[in-house]
Image (cartoon, coloured by chain):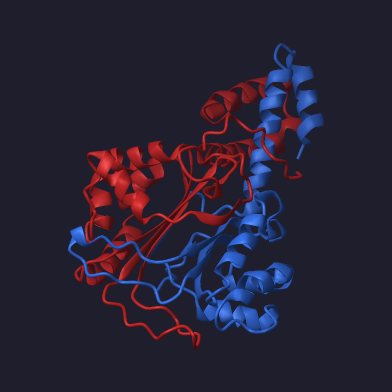
Amino acid sequence: MSDPNRNGQAYGFQAMTPIQPGMEDDLRAHLEGMHAEGSPFAKLARTHMARFVIVPDFYNDRSWGQKEEHLDLQYLIFTSNLDGDIDSYLDELCDVVAPDAQEIWGRCVGCPADASGTALKKYLKHNQIDCGFFYAAYGDATVGKVQAALAQREKVIAFASRTQGLDPAELQQAFVAEFGGK
Amino acid sequence: MSAQAPSAGPVTATGTARGNIHGQAIAITVFSTIKWWGKPFLPVLFAATKRVPKLTTTLVQLSFIHFARWSVITELPYNGPPQKKQKWRYPHMYFESNFNGGWEEYIDAFSHILTSGMTAFWGSSYGFPKPLPTAPFKAYIQNNETEASHYYSAYPDATTTMINGALDIDRKFAPLKRSAEGMDPDAFAAAWERFLTDSQHAL
């Protein structure tokens, strides 16, 4: 049976962990203080896109004909869209992100006292929620491949603009100088 | 080639809370409560959608989605007190999307282009008002949406169209790079012209 969390080489990871009562505001402040440019995920080269979301409760509307249902605690959702296999990714995450991990999952119920390494990995896998359906628009391309292709596209656009009007020999020479012959 | 950030186009990420935005990328996170019949129905729908590529054609055509996922959650792993071992009355569906463009335009496009797909995916959710007209559907999503506290993209300035274009260019560019040096200049100039014409949509 195929892995429901996989699309091409891309993997969709999700963990949902209960937040220690009283810690919600501190956790939110820490997460909101991590600006995207300085995100811990920037240190994980296999992360395409990731998020932290604090879910306070389910939305209830009696006019919809449902009975009210509430979460017992507020929950932290962590999702990542990543390259390759999840085990080695979580190894990297639990190592590289350890200082932030203590501030994040360290505020969640059941998290090991030292929120790092194999203990944190085990905790995250215990709280993993499988995807029902995972869509990736370019699931065969790694982060490195996407970034390199975008950079190359920029170079091609600049080169095409710069070399308009060159004769064939000059154009070829400029091309080889810019992009290499092989 | 070293990776560089592409030049940023106009930022189109609009219509949502600040926490859901990184560059051009927008996060949407939605929980919905499922009626009893959604529990057996949705896994079948997900499996069929995965196995029949034709069913995702429209999703691909909506070329502003990077990654998206749907999950049906019936219970949560237990981590000890003070978490309670909860037996939920209802299953709940988690949906997230990573896309570029405006939030309003995203919902509009979903509703107008993926009308039957939306009904299939959300039809078993309490309160789902049908995709059209879009105003009640937008209100439904807003009620069930939660803002991200942190959102990250590895290539925040790139849209899905730019990325697919860049990957397409990469496929077409590799043979030209390999053969450029050994070609006759006129043949090279013709090949370069052909490459530009073939890649026009992606440049």
**Quarter occupied by residue B104:** top left
Residue A131 in view in this figure: yes
Q: Quadrant of the N terminus of chain B?
A: top right
Q: Colour of chain A?
A: blue
Vertical arrangement, residue A42 with respect to residue A161, above or below: below
* Residue depicted at 45% across the width and 39% down the height: B15
Q: Which chain is red?
A: B
**Quarter occupied by residue A93:** bottom right
Vertical arrangement, residue B139 with respect to residue B146, above or below: above
- Residue at the limit of the structure toward the bottom, as seen here: B80
Q: Please give left or right for residue B99 compared with residue A50 in the image.
A: left
- Residue at the limit of the structure toward the front, as seen here: A22
Q: Quadrant of the C terminus of chain B?
A: top right
B184 or A131: nearer the viewer: A131
Number of marks in the image?
A: 0
Residue A28: % across, % down: 58, 62
Q: Please give left or right for residue B151 compared with residue A176 in the image.
A: left
Residue A64: % across, % down: 20, 59
Residue A136 in view in this figure: no
B63 or B52: nearer the viewer: B63
* Residue depicted at 31% across the width and 78% down the height: B88
* Residue depicted at 71% across the width and 11% down the height: A165
Q: Please give left or right for residue B143 compared with residue A164 in the image.
A: left
* Residue depicted at 48% across the width and 70% down the height: A75
Q: Please give left or right for residue B32 compared with residue A111 in the image.
A: left
Vertical arrangement, residue B144 with respect to residue B60, above or below: below
Residue B183: % across, % down: 72, 28
Residue A98: % across, % down: 71, 72
A98 or B200: nearer the viewer: A98
